Structure formats: C-alpha cells, structure tokens
Image: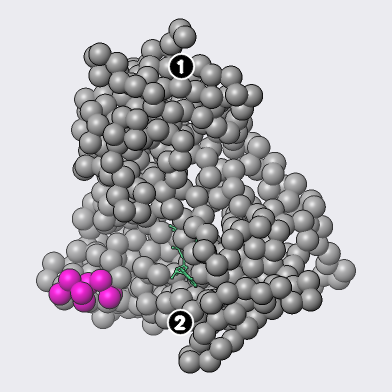
C-alpha cells in the first residue's frame, strides 16, 4: 500500500492532540492528526468539558430565573424548561467548536485523517508505520518519523454496576438525557459528579451524591471542599460522604443503590445512576505492544520528562499519561512535546496547573493546599477574604464563598490560591500568572485592582497574609 510520509503523526484529536499538531505545523513540520471520530476535539469538545459547561450555564440560568432573581427584585411567571431546546443549544456549541478544530487543521495544513490508527511496524530508519482503519473498514497506511500518542481517557466502570447507557450511565450519557430524571444517584463526588449532579438538580432531579472519601473534590483544599459541600447542600443536593457502595438492585422498575454509611446498611432509589468514579487512560487498539511501548500498572503510557516513551520516536501526552486529567494540562503538554520534537525547549510547569469545578459557586485553585504544605513541612501564612465583604459580589447578589491565599512564611512566595465563589474559574487566572512569575503575596497586595471588581477579593486575601486587610 502506498504510504503518506509525515514528520509527525498525532493519534488523537483532543485538546492534547490537536494542539500538538498545530504547534508542530507552526514549527514547519509535516503533520497528520488521526482520530476515529470525524468530529475533531476529543472527549473535551464532544462529550466532556464543553457540553457539560453548556448545560451548566443553561441550567444555572434556569435555576436563577426560578430561585435567584427575586433577590434582585426581578420575578418571572410561568418559567418552563424546554430540555430539547437546551440540548439543541449544547449540540450547536459542540458543532461550532468541533467544526472550528477541523478548520484549524486546514488552516495549518495538517492532514486530517478519520480512522483508527494502529502501529504495524518500525521501518529501517526508525520511522513508524501505522495502519489506519476507516469507519467503513477501509485500510490505508501512513509513515511517520515521530508519533505522538494522545488517545485520552474513558470513564471507569464499577465491576458490580456495569453501564447500561440508560439507567446506569457514565458522563457520556449524563450530558444527553432526554428527560429530567425524577431521582439521580451520583456515585463519586469529584468534578464530574458535582457538575452533572448540579445540572440535573437545577433542572428538577432529586440528587444524592455517594462519595467514598470523607470530602468531596479529592485533592482540593479541605476547607474549600467543605465550603462547596455546604453550598451545594443548600441548593438541595444530598451527600453521603465516607459511603461504601455495595451494589444495585432492580425494584419496581427503578434502581436501588445499596451502600454502607456510618456503620449502617443504606439504600437509595434512583431513576438514573450516574457513575463518576474517575477516568482511565485509553490506548485500546493503538497496537502499543507491536512496537513495545510500555504502560504502567494503571494502563498509562510511561513517559520521561520530555514526553518520550521507551520507544525512540514515540511520545505521549494528555489523559493517557500520568498526571491530572485536564484539557489544559494536555494542551500544555501538546505544545511542549511538539516544540521538543522540533528541537526547541518546551516546558510545562506542573506546579501551576489550575483546577476548576464548575459548580455554582465555582471552586478553583492553583498550587498547594494547606494540607499539602503541612505534609511537606513548609511553614505558611494564610490570608482569607469573604466575598460577602466584596462590593461587586454583593451587587451581583453572589456573595457566597471566599478566597484563600497561602504564602511561604519565610519568603512570602505564593504557594497556592483557592477560590470558592462566583467566576472563580476566571479569577484563578491572575493567581496562576503571579505564581508563574514566582510572585509574592505582597506583589498581589501592592497591585492596583479596579474597583468595584471581584479580583479585589484576591488582593484583600493577599493583604490578609500579612494581617492587614482593609475591608474586613
Ligand atoms: P475524580 O477522580 O475527580 O472523582 C471521582 C470520585 O469518586 C473520587 O472522589 C473518588 O473518591 C470517588 N469514588 C471512587 N470510587 C468510588 C466508589 N466505589 N464509591 C463512591 N465514590 C467513589 O473523577 P471524575 O469526577 O469522574 O472525573 C474524571 C476525571 O476528569 C478527573 O481527572 C477530573 O479531574 C476530570 N474532569 C475535570 C473537570 C474539570 O476540570 N472541571 C470536569 C470533569 C472531569
């Protein structure tokens, strides 16, 4: 079979893969990007970040119209939900963005290939031969000097609760329900569980979250997680923390989830059960074994600090390798990996990767938590500022939450910033820039922030590190 020859073939067109392809093309390399889905954009654009945010934004407006605007003196009558229209809007956003990615492939002269890529052999000069199988089963071949594996991740299934796509679902279906379930049990209090739990709760479901650990959003600062749990409870979500899910039964056409909690045998009926207990690296069908690419005990492709696998000319990035499964982490790795392949000095600063849970209010953070500082034995000063003392948040009638700045006690360098509050996802950007520049709490405190704005809460929390807040 006649083979097209590329400098770089990227397998996977998610935020890691398509960004790596663009950066490599910008640097003058001949690039192809292969994905088995014709809609380029990966999990993030098709069934992850983007559709879930479209639902979060729409459901938040619905909830506010019903419960939130009265506080501002605005009332509505006859508010109705048109779930079909809401889903159609979500689809339109997905369509716009995935079409946009295909447009970017064209603009950057990247060969877009739709099909499943599989390693078949290594050529004499070390080049990799890949076989591409199209949706119709047709086979073609490509050859590449470098291959970047960016095949992403898939939802984890519980062995005793297999997905059926209808009553026991993953986030893939959780973003596409055609009816608001009367009751929804969410297993897992991580980002997916809380975001989709919020969506369906706002639209009218009775939502119960069963989380194995003693706190929601594992990995976030404990005080912030408690704050988020408190607000979500007020919004009507029900939580069982430290719950050990034991099984699921069919009772009268409904699912009943059984679990142990505080030494008691419990059960919770649900029209739909959303299993959101994490995601796992996905490399099925890539033929890693054909060329001998190593994976770890969790199926993640093993890479060194330069994204290189153990096989010369094969790199891997994003959700299929170790590290947080975040679109923006994958993007940074894609850029750095492409730069390294092109002989440049790419770099990812893993200490400054923001994380966001898009609930209302949002929880966002960057850097270390107080618990992590303690575990490392780093002495810190902490400043906290409540949004109820921030003028703009009060005007917006969105005064829930607070900002926490953690700074090194000796050097004042900012080690972590945690925000529970309205627009936290945007506010965390300033903190990330400060940390990227190795800035101090005093740097934030001495920076003039426009008034009245939400970022003033960050400035005040930074002042709080030195016990000199002005508005609290
Ligand atoms: P996660 O790993 O963030 O949270 C899963 C939760 O399920 C954990 O708290 C875990 O303790 C709990 N759990 C595990 N087994 C359980 C069991 N048998 N019973 C009860 N609880 C159990 O995973 P999640 O939320 O599914 O998200 C998957 C990945 O996608 C994560 O890496 C996440 O960071 C990423 N993601 C990020 C988003 C964001 O940045 N906003 C949004 C959605 C996903």
Badge 2 is on which residue? Answer: 242
Ligand 1 within 8 Å of disc 1? The answer is no
What kind of element bears circle 2? loop
Going from N to C along the chain, the mark reached first, 2 or 1, is 1
C-alpha distance separating marks 2 and 1: 51 Å
Report the front residue among 346 and 457. Answer: 346
Mark 2: few/some/many CA within 10 Å (<14, 14-19, 20+): some
Tell me: 71 left or right of 49: right
Residue at x-position 35% and y-position 54%: 298
Q: Position of residue 439 (x, y in %)?
A: 22, 58
Magenta residues, start to end? 370-377
Question: Mostly what secondary structure, the magenta segment?
Answer: helix
Badge 1 is on which residue? Answer: 141
Q: Are marks 2 and 1 in contact (CB under 8 Å)?
A: no
The residue most toward the right is 78
The residue most toward the left is 410
Q: Position of residue 425 (x, y in %)?
A: 47, 59
Report the front residue among 192 and 165. Answer: 165
Q: Position of residue 221 (x, y in %)?
A: 36, 73
Q: Is residue 128 magenta?
A: no
């Amino acid at each position: 079979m006649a083979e097209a020859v590329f400098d770089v073939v990227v397998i996977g067109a998610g935020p890691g893969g398509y960004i790596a392809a663009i950066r490599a093309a910008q640097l003058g390399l001949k690039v192809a990007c292969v994905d088995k889905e014709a809609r380029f954009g990966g999990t993030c654009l098709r069934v992850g970040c983007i559709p879930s945010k479209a639902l979060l934004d729409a459901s938040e407006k619905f909830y506010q119209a019903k419960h939130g605007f009265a506080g501002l003196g605005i009332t509505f009558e006859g508010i109705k939900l048109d779930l079909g229209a809401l889903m159609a809007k979500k689809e339109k956003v997905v369509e716009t963005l995935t079409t946009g990615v295909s447009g970017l492939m064209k603009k950057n002269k990247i060969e877009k290939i739709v099909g499943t890529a599989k390693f078949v052999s290594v050529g004499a000069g070390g080049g990799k031969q890949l076989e591409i199988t199209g949706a119709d089963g047709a086979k073609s071949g490509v050859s590449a000097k470098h291959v970047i594996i960016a095949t992403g991740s898939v939802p984890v299934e519980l062995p005793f609760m297999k997905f059926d796509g209808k009553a026991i679902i993953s986030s893939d279906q959780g973003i596409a329900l055609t009816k608001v379930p009367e009751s929804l049990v969410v297993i897992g209090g991580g980002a997916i569980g809380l975001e989709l739990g919020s969506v369906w709760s706002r639209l009218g479901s009775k939502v119960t979250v069963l989380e194995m650990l003693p706190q929601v959003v594992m990995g976030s600062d404990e005080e912030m997680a408690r704050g988020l749990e408190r607000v979500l409870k007020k919004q009507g979500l029900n939580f069982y923390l430290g719950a050990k899910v034991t099984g699921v039964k069919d009772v009268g056409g409904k699912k009943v989830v059984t679990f142990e909690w505080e030494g008691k045998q419990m059960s919770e009926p649900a029209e739909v059960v959303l299993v959101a207990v994490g995601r796992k690296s996905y490399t099925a069908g890539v033929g890693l074994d054909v060329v001998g690419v190593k994976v770890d005990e969790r199926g993640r492709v093993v890479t060194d600090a330069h994204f290189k696998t153990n096989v010369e000319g094969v790199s891997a990035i994003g959700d299929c390798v170790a590290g947080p499964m975040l679109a923006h982490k994958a993007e940074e790795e894609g850029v750095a990996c492409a730069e390294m392949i092109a002989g440049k000095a790419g770099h990812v600063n893993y200490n400054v990767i923001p994380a966001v849970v898009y609930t209302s209010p949002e929880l966002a953070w960057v850097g270390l938590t107080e618990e992590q500082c303690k575990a490392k034995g780093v002495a810190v000063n902490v400043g906290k500022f409540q949004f109820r003392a921030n003028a703009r948040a009060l005007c917006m009638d969105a005064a829930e939450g607070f900002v926490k700045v953690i700074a090194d006690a000796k050097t004042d360098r900012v080690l972590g910033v945690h925000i529970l509050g309205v627009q936290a996802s945007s506010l965390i950007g300033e903190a990330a820039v400060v940390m990227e520049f190795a800035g101090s709490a005093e740097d934030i405190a001495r920076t003039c922030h426009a008034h009245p704005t939400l970022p003033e809460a960050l400035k005040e929390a930074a002042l709080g590190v030195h016990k000199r807040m002005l508005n609290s």
